[in-house]
Image: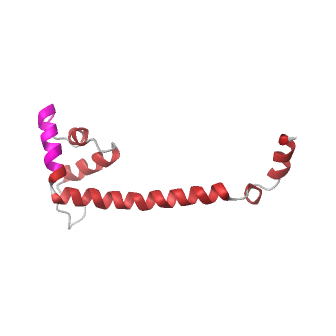
Amino acid sequence: MSEDSRLTAKQEKFVECYLSNGGNATQAARDAGYSSTGETLRTVAYENLTKPDIQARIAARTAEAKIHTDEVLGTLASHMRADIALVMPGVSEILCKSII
């Protein structure tokens, strides 16, 4: 947690759990260590998601993840379009023989 963070350690954990579990706020509250009753967890989850500091952290983390996702997809696309013979010399002969 950075010095300028306005989130508690438990709130930081909530954000981390929320993002890693696909957006299940109740499960994130449970995993972050909030009270274990179902109704209380739902209430805490709702309250956390309405707090501006938590919303901002989720938005920032999502934006960071999107950048990484775009980079990964770009790399995969460039590899997909690459000529395999440039990466693996001799593979074109193997491919040609297996087709025949």
Residue 71 position in % (x across, y down)? 50, 61
Instruction: Name the residue: 41% across, 58% down.
Output: 66
Residue 96 position in % (x across, y down)? 85, 47
Residue 92 position in % (x across, y down)? 82, 52
Magenta segment includes 44: yes
Q: Judge from the rendering whether residue 17 lies leftward or rightward of residue 41; answer left or right.
A: right
Magenta segment includes 100: no
Image quadrant in which the N terminus is located: bottom left
Q: Judge from the rendering whether residue 79 lies leftward or rightward of residue 100; answer left or right.
A: left
Q: Judge from the rendering whether residue 24 lies leftward or rightward of residue 68; answer left or right.
A: left
Residue 32 position in % (x across, y down)? 22, 43
Residue 21 falls in image quadrant = top left
- Looking at this rendering, what residue extends furthest in the top direction? 37
User: What span is in magenta?
Assistant: 35-48
Image quadrant in which the C terminus is located: top right
Instruction: Name the residue: 32% across, 49% down.
Output: 19
Instruction: Name the residue: 17% across, 55% down.
Output: 8
Our reading of the magenta stretch's main secondary structure is: helix
Q: Judge from the rendering whether residue 7 lies leftward or rightward of residue 79; answer left or right.
A: left
Residue 86 falls in image quadrant = bottom right
Residue 85 falls in image quadrant = bottom right
